[in-house]
Image (cartoon, helix red, strand yellow):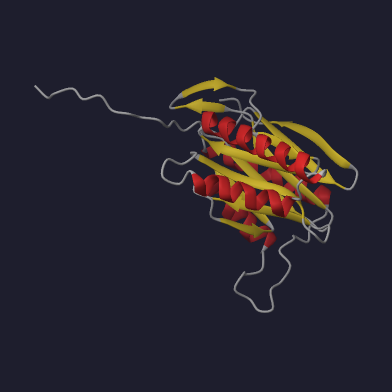
Amino acid sequence: MSKQQARFEPYDFNGGTCVAIAGADYCVVAADTRMSTGYNILTRDYSKINKLADKCLMASSGFQADVRALQKVLGAKHLIYQHQHNKQMSCPAMARLLSNTLYYKRFFPYYTFNVLVGFDEEGKGCVYTYDAVGSYEKVGYSAQGSGAKLIMPVLDNQLKSPSPLLLPALDAVTPLTEAEAIDVVKDVFASATERDIYTGDKLEIVIVNADGIRREYAELRKD
């Protein structure tokens, strides 16, 4: 008879998918609202998109308890920054803060996979994509989460982002209009939902542009 051993399992994977697309004067970030564990759906109405500053948002998949802890830490650090500098943090500064926060916990990481969207110093849309220990890259589009392997090939085919190895460096923003980007996001989520059991129920789309932030919703498969 084998001896029973107690094991420390600090992580869970709650599934879900996040997608972000940057344009010349807008950003679109979207995520489904399903939260699961194993074959169980915990809730069908959970937002994975968090507002960090007036025009800076983060979408996160992975272990949602760690996501909440990370959001809390970023919120506290941003509040301190506002008190010290009397202004909100820019999106590139927030991107570096998120990277440093994740890297600081690299030996016991936040099990989160994040995309950060906002505007860069030139006023163009930007997307930053991360791994769990803070390595990040500025890109024109990205996907994270359980459906990312299904979605990224479609985005690569449709948007054809320039290689970061090209010199001189080309602009990463996509050539799509805001309406076209929203349509692409709806299409890729409809496709991913057919094959990924952790993605579904409802799609939350947040659009950031010169007018501010607005939200749209679309229905996805519920089975």
Q: Quadrant of the N terminus?
A: top left
**Residue 46 at x, y percent in the picture:** 63, 26
Task: Pinpoint residue 142: horizontal percent, then vertical percent.
Answer: 63, 52
Count of numbered circles in the view: 0
Check the image and report above or below for 45 versus 156. Answer: above
Q: Is residue 184 left or right of residue 103?
A: right
**Quadrant of the image occupied by residue 5:** top left
Task: Reply above or below: 24 against 118.
Answer: below
198 to the left or right of 59: left
Q: Position of residue 125 (x, y in %)?
A: 78, 55
Q: Is residue 190 visible?
A: no
Quarter occupied by the C terminus? top right
* Residue 114 vs residue 193, the one in the foreground: 114
Looking at the image, the residue that sits furthest to the front is 84
Q: Is residue 4 left or right of residue 112?
A: left
Q: Is residue 141 visible?
A: yes
Residue 107 in percent (x, y) is at: 41, 45
Name the residue located 48 percent from the left edge and 43 percent from the top edge. Answer: 105
Q: Nearer the viewer, residue 111 or 2?
A: 111
- Residue 12 placement, left or right of 186: left
Residue at the far right in the pictured view: 211
Q: Quadrant of residue 158?
A: bottom right
Please identify the residue farthest to the bottom as the structure is shown.
Answer: 167
Q: Nearer the viewer, residue 178 or 212?
A: 212
Rendered residue at 56%/31% (across/down)? 69
Q: In the displayed structure, would residue 114 be above or below residue 201? A: below
